[in-house]
Image: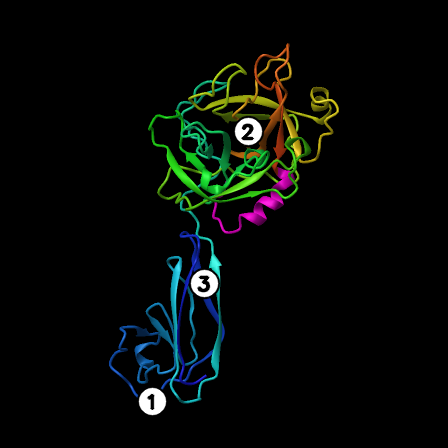
Amino acid sequence: PNGQRCELQLKADNELSKIEIKCTSFLLVESGKRKKDNKDGSKDNRSNDNRSNVCNDYLQINDIRYCDTKGPDLVTSGNTVFIKFESDRNKRGYGFSCHAKLIPRENEGCKCGQERHENRIVDGVESQVQYPWMTGIVIFPARYIPSCGGALINDRWVLSAAHCFSLKYRIFPGLVTVLLNEHRIAVEDGETWHAVRQIIVHPMFKSFRKGYDVALLELSEPINFNLSDTRPVCLPTPGQDYEEADAKVMGWGKTSWDESPSKVLLEVTIPILNITQCSLVYPGLGLMHTMICAGSPHNGTGICRGDSGGPMITHEDGHFVQIGIASFGRARTELHDGCSSAAVFTRVTAVLDWIINNTKNANTCSP
C-alpha cells in the first residue's frame, strides 16, 4: 500500500535464541533521486554500483534498508530485531512476503549429562556438586531445606514429581524456589536461587500410586550455560526400558526414618528391578507402564522422605540420562528401619512426549 509507515519489534523469549528473516517475494521500487544519506543513519542494502537511487519504498531490518528486488535473508546476532516499513504515495511496487523464524542458539561447549570428576563419591557419601543438574526445591515456609528434589533438563525447565505440588493442596509458583549448584544446605558455597514462573502438573496425575507422578517447573529466567557451571541432565532414549541396569539416585532426604533431612547432598547406586521383582516388593499395587522400580530389597538402601522428585540417572554412551523421578517407597517396617529399600519412580520414557511438548521454548545441550 502507498503512504504507509509502520514499525515492529520482535523479541524471542529466550535470550539465547536468534531470529531468521527470509522473503519469498520482494519488489519495492526505488525512486529516481539520490540522497547523500538516510536521515535515520540506516544504510541501503545495495552495492555502490547500484546506489544511484534511494530507497523511498523500503523494508528496514535493524539498521539496513532493503528495496528494489533484493529482500533480507539473514539471521540476527541476538534475540531482538527491529523492523520498519515505509512507502511513498506512488503505487509502483509489488510489495513483499517475508517471514520470521525462531532459531534456538546453541550453547557453546555445552554438554548435557556430564558429571564433574573431582571428589568422586559413592553409596551415601558426601557429594561435591558432582551432578550439576541436581536441584533442591524449597517450598515456603521452609527457608533452606529442600522439600523435594528435581533435575534441570534444559535452560528453563526442572523435572520433578507432581505430588510435591499437588496432593492435599496446590502449591503456587510464588511459594517455590529452585536451588542450583548446592551441596551443603545453609552454607554459602556457590549455590544459586531461582524463582519459578509456572508449575505444570501432568494432567493424568491423581495420586502417586496411580502413576504420572511428574511435574515441570519453569524458571523465571533462563540459565545461560556459557556463564554458569550448571548443566542439564540428558533425557533418555525413547523406547528403552533400562531394566536390570545400575542407576544412581541423590538428594537431601533423610538417611533413616528417625533422622532429620541430610544437610549435604548424598547419592546411592541401586539396581533397576524388573516387573516380577517389583511386584514381590509391592504386591497388589498394580504397576503401571509409567512406573519403574529400583532399589535393594534386602539392605534398606534407597530413597527416603525428602528425596521425592529427585532424578534417577544411569550412564549411557558417555553421559548420564535421567530415567526416573523419585515417587514413593515402602513405609517403615520391622525388617527395614532404613529408608525404602526398593522404591517406585516415574518412568521418564513413558512421559517423554509430554515433557518435550511442554518445553519447546527452551534450549538445551547436546550429549
Q: Nearer the viewer, residue 326 or 61?
A: 326
Relative to residue 128, is residue 56 depicted above or below?
below
Residue 204, horizontal then vertical, whole percent: 66, 41
Mark sitting earlier along the chain (2/3): 3
In the rendered image, the residue lying farthest to the top is 334
Q: Is residue 16 left or right of residue 123?
A: left
Front in this rendered view, residue 334 or 71: 334
Amino acid at pointer 3: Glu
**Helix, strand or loop status at disc 2:** loop
Residue type at the position of mark 1: Gly
Q: Dot 2, how many residues are within 10 Å of its Cα: few (below 14), some (14-19), or many (20+)?
A: many
At which x and y percent is residue 351? Answer: 63, 41
Identify the residue at horizontal 49%, vertical 15% (top origin): 259
Where's residue 185, x and y in %? 40, 25
Q: Secondary structure at mark 3?
A: strand
- The dot on residue 32 is 1
Marker disc for residue 20: 3
- Which mark, residue 308? 2
Name the mark nearer the viewer: 2 or 3: 2
